[in-house]
Amino acid sequence: MGDDTERRQRHIDRIEKKIAKLDTFLKTAEPRLGGSVGEVQSNITDPESARIKSPHRYIQGYNGIAIADSAHLVIVSAEAFGSGSESQHFPAMLDSLEENMQTVTGKEKPLKKALVTGDTGYFSENNLQEAKNRNISVLIPDQQFRRRDPYFDNRKGHTVNRFTAQDFAYNKKNNTFLCPNKKTLVHKGFIKLNRNSGDKYQASPADCKNCRFLSRCVASRGGKTHMRTLYLPVSKYAENLSDKMRKKIDDPAYRELYSRRMQIIEPVFADITYCKDMNRFSLRSKIKVNIQWLLFCMVHNIAKCRQPLALRYGV
């Protein structure tokens, strides 16, 4: 083992080596941008990975994204990304999907009559505008759509549907908003939030304290009730597709149509992670992890195609 002096020197050498590695990383690495949240934390061991929320804790890793068809649950597009948020990769997944379907079908516009559904994590004005520019029909609900669904009203744990900006009446003359309890929200100025900017309106604490709609309007954190604030971001687009999508998903017919998404993509991930036990990536760097994720998806597709091909060709 050597004497104390040798062990101490080895310990100092290891620390200095780590310091040199960190110093080199800080001098050469470019800032990582994470969608709308701006710069995000980087990892020295694998700079392309990200902190991702798992069912139990945050882990350092990659997100495997996949798109499957509704008829056979075959994966038609897949890619792994080193980011916690999936929303920013929606345009890239549409690129991959269109390219793959053009190869399979031979059509110039293979998604002309198709409907692409996505979970609430993909809901954003940018993604809806991207789909519109490509003439692709999408059904992506907002994060609050279940709170507006009367089917869940009597369910245990169902949270109360909160008021949205549409429930407040605007007074153009005074540049104020009137809440459902007929109280005034005053304009507090033009502010910046993340990468967006817009007008902020706020009610007084006294008006919110004893309001009969308090549970539907203001969140309570740590026993302290906050006053209601409206933030109206400046839209970069002439048409507000987010509001249109909210009205669309509130239609019972579209709610029923969206409910099928669970039967399409969730069995695919369950087959890969649970049935085939391919539930984590074992490599580093995006290019290697992406190859591993595509292999996982290929294994799933082979299993899906094996039985139909055997019935057709007798093998």
Image: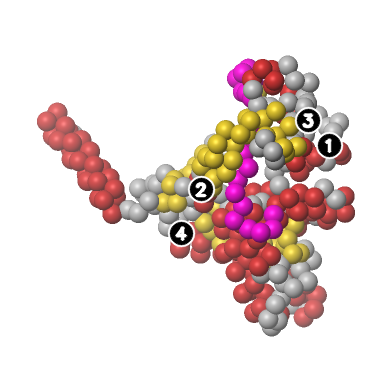
Q: Amino acid at mark 1?
A: Phe
Q: Which segment did they paint magenta? A: 221-240
Q: Which residue is mark 2?
A: 195
Residue 79 seen anywhere in this rendered image of the structure: yes
Q: Residue at x 62, y 39 (%)?
A: 231
Whether the magenta-drawn stretch holds residue 33 is answered as: no
Residue 228 part of the magenta-drawn span: yes
The Cα atoms of the two marked residues, 4 and 1, are separated by 40 Å
Residue type highlighted by circle 4: Lys
Dot 1: what SS? helix
Element carrying mark 2: loop
Residue occupied by mark 1: 152
What kind of residue is marked 3? Pro
Label the magenta part by its dominant secondary structure. Answer: loop
Mark identifier at residue 180: 3
Horizontally, is 151 left or right of 210 in the view?
Answer: right
